[in-house]
Amino acid sequence: MNEAVFPKPAAEAVERPAPQPPLGLLAELTHRCPLRCTYCSNPLELDTRSSELDTETWKRVFTEAAELGVIHVHLSGGEPTARKDIVELTRHAAEVGLYTNLITSGIGVSEAQLDALFEAGCDHIQLSMQGADAGVTEQVAGYKGGFEKKEAFARAVVARDFPLTLNAVIHRMNIHQVPDMIDKAVAFGAKRLEIAHTQYYGWALKNRAQLMPAREDVDRTIGEVESARERLKGTLVIDAVFPDYYAKYPKLCNGGWGARTLSVTPAGKALPCHAAETIEHLEFWSVRDHSLAEIWASSPAFEAYRGTAWMKEPCRSCERRHVDYGGCRCQALALTGDPANADPACVKSDFHERLGEIATTEASTVADPGAATYRGFRKR
Ligand code: SF4
Ligand code: FES
């Protein structure tokens, strides 16, 4: 999940802090989704429908989240509206005092369902955008007719005077459309647009060679975003997250491990971040067996990389260790084999040079959408 979804934390300068209450909960209600996006950050092994938490368990989780101090719940997936109880879950989250943000593809949501969601207390809609036209949208999402459905959905939200954010994940297949996506966001009536370069977890990591943009294209989008921000002041707010692979220092990931946010998978595992299951040696507790408060306070997975006591060099003695907390543990694992290493996006990491080589090599291969692996449930 990116910085625009979760707020930045205060950077407590302590080695092993007592956890403050979390602010955000990412509720991955289901992995079912009509789209098959190649950049999806869901795990390769998707939770099946039969393994999903039932309605009452999710309601208990939302009640416990509110009692724990969570302010925002992000109803996500997969496609959260694929659940028949989405209105009931939204109503319960709103009733216990959570700010509810629905993160949706917009596909398959009827106007009647939209009305019911707003009546139930949905506060905000975040709509994914794969491209600025039908061709790119279909190529990225593997779904015919997606662009037209998304446009109709966006207009239906705005017609009801509800706040709409568009979320555009950027990569080599759509980076040439950034100015057009900004124009479409204005045309659709969105108030906010997130331009978030792909983070390489799950399906996105598998498809990295097809998704990695060239450095000059990334630099160009920075200029495009800056000039659009100036031009569209008062009309559209643009948040931007630029890629790690060309960075000098890593980003603080998810507000810090076990510091401000938590995720719950469709099957009920509580994770410090949405990609944490890739760190296979960690012990994840389930909301089926533990309260959210117990998990937050003492689950082994949340304790593993809290604070700075777990750090090795160069992070251990680095002056930025309370700023970025060593970057992303999942990216450190994926690229160096050890989640306790510095995120290789950091110039001080021994793997940093290799990261730049990977990005340059992959960005210069000829894009072949036919070679990408579209997201989907594994055939059993
Ligand atoms: Fe962050 Fe570690 Fe790099 Fe320092 S060495 S900037 S703490 S990743
Ligand atoms: Fe960054 Fe897991 S995604 S720590």
Image (cartoon, rainbow, N blue to C red):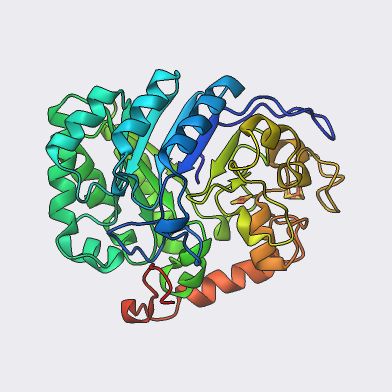
In the image shown, does 217 or 196 lie closer to the viewer?
196
Residue in the foreground of this view, choosing between 206 and 245: 206
- Does the rendering let one see residue 75? yes
Q: Quadrant of the C terminus?
A: bottom left
Q: In the image, residue 333 lies at what x, y percent? A: 69, 62
Q: Quadrant of residue 37?
A: bottom left
* Position above or below: 197 against 81: below
User: Can you give x and y, in whole percent of width and height, for residue 335 in the image?
Assistant: 66, 67
Q: How many marks?
A: 0
Front residue of this view, candidates 84 and 197: 84
Residue 5 in sight in this render: no
- The residue lying at 46 percent from left, 66 percent from top is 203
* Location of residue 356 by image quarter: bottom right
Residue 64 higher or lower than 277, as above or below: above
Q: Where, by quadrant of the figure, is residue 342 drawn? A: bottom right
Q: Position of residue 209 (x, y in %)?
A: 47, 74
Q: Is residue 278 left or right of residue 179?
A: right
Q: Residue 304's x, y, as percent?
A: 77, 47
Q: Residue at x 38, y 22 (%)?
A: 94
